[in-house]
Amino acid sequence: MPTTLRLFVSADLSAGSVLVLDDEQSNYLLRVLRLGVGGEVRLFNGRDGEWDTAITSVTGKRATVSPVSQRRPQPAPTSPAMTLLFAPVKKDETDLIVEKATELGAVSICPVLTQRTQTRTVRLDRFNKIALEAAEQTERLDLPAITDLAGLDQALDVLTPGTAVIFCDEAGDEAGAPWGGDTGRAGPARAVLEGLRGRNAAILIGPEGGFTPEERAFLRARPDTFAVSLGPRILRAETAAISAMTLWQAVCGDWG
Amino acid sequence: MPTTLRLFVSADLSAGSVLVLDDEQSNYLLRVLRLGVGGEVRLFNGRDGEWDTAITSVTGKRATVSPVSQRRPQPAPTSPAMTLLFAPVKKDETDLIVEKATELGAVSICPVLTQRTQTRTVRLDRFNKIALEAAEQTERLDLPAITDLAGLDQALDVLTPGTAVIFCDEAGDEAGAPWGGDTGRAGPARAVLEGLRGRNAAILIGPEGGFTPEERAFLRARPDTFAVSLGPRILRAETAAISAMTLWQAVCGDWG
């Protein structure tokens, strides 16, 4: 059994229960992978851990499967937790951000509407499908919660109190802006993150055009908000998101 | 002048020199951006720093420009330097790796042919174009050197002596494999990198199917080779590349 054969289902999973897979998953197992009765697949649902499961019957186009044994129990919710707040960019790059946030263990993915965000609508069904497929590939046992597009202030308001907001402003840190305390500049991401171990974090990535002066003033006045720098080269939005999430996992998360 | 209007040219740049831009760059300035005589653009060539330049005449479809003043001198070559060795994957993901390696400051990008590499040819012209556009956007003043597809052993042989090879094996570290010395496992990337500060580094990313036992034995026997882990989730090849380059820059490179 290839180790990547792993599907997310919404039904409960327990030994001996019986599930009829939907058309798409059945098609994948029966037609694409050419499995039949006895074929093996791992299932997870975000609640009951991961189960080794076998196809018990095929009726028409649909496969019926039954969990045999639990392979991994459901882990406790990640703590501290990392949320990604991002301004949607172009379609391909936005899709990439959702996929990579799932791979990199974000527990919530929150598109935010900033003043310079060009994209004013998001396709939640599309985002959820991308996240589901990424979770299947990446061996996660849960799915990230994906919220609908919300204003920046609303998105920040609903964070768990005390969450450290890690603000990546790739559009450039204006000289003299009072980020990062005395230095007048954003601090290197790794050094700032080392001071935030043990705290829930929300990584905030702006649109290609950056934040407006009003938004910067709003963020500056906000407690628990930390501006970070991601090096001397200007990163595109999706790269900044992936790099910031990577550094958070390596310094504060479960990569240790 | 938008700060992103930045073009790479191959000609020498000095005050008062005269350059005729090629059709593609002329079209971009004259038709897409609708600039005319007096229009401003920044130029770099990887040798002479970055120059503020103005359009001095338009002949037919082509713009002639003349450097006015040097905006930034050419920096010294990056030291320590980071090279990316990667097994080509699918087209979109391979393109993404080349683009992100450029954004993340790799000085060389080297596609390598491993035993499980599915893609046996690469388009160097395409890679160079992607890297050029990424360098223009990311404010780099040089371009990465991109080498043709080479066998893994050949690619390792031509590294500067003493280069630390950072081996990311997302396909899974077999239990008991003698990576990372006593522990029998790859070490967390950040901790391993902290021991490699000041050294040139080559980050090695395998194909989706991972390395073969023979390749692992070859790497294991090689001096200056360090296996690293990128957390408990299985990352896709392009994600592993971006994350490993990010961590190298944050720990050993110029993000400090």
Image: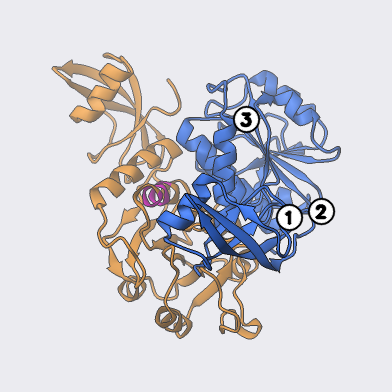
Chain colours: A blue, B orange
Tell me the residue at 54%/52% (across/down).
B254
Q: Which residues are magenta?
A: B93-99
Instruction: Give the letter of the chain under mark 2.
Output: A
Tell me the residue at 47%/32% (across/down).
A91
Q: Which mark is residue A198?
A: 2
Compare marks 2 and 1 and give the one earlier in the sequence.
Answer: 2
Question: Where does the image place residue A125, in percent across and percent down from the top left?
Answer: 58, 33
Question: Where does the image place residue B20, in percent across and percent down from the top left?
Answer: 18, 28
**Mark 2 against mark 3, which lies toward the viewer?**
2
Secondary element under disc 1, as helix, strand or loop, is loop
Q: Which residue in the protein does label 1 denote?
A: A252
Label 2 close to label 1 by CB (< 8 Å): yes
Q: State whether residue B145 is above or below residue B8.
A: below
Question: Where does the image place residue A239, in percent across and percent down from the top left?
Answer: 52, 43
Q: Which residue in the protein does label 3 denote?
A: A175
Secondary element under disc 3, as helix, strand or loop, is loop
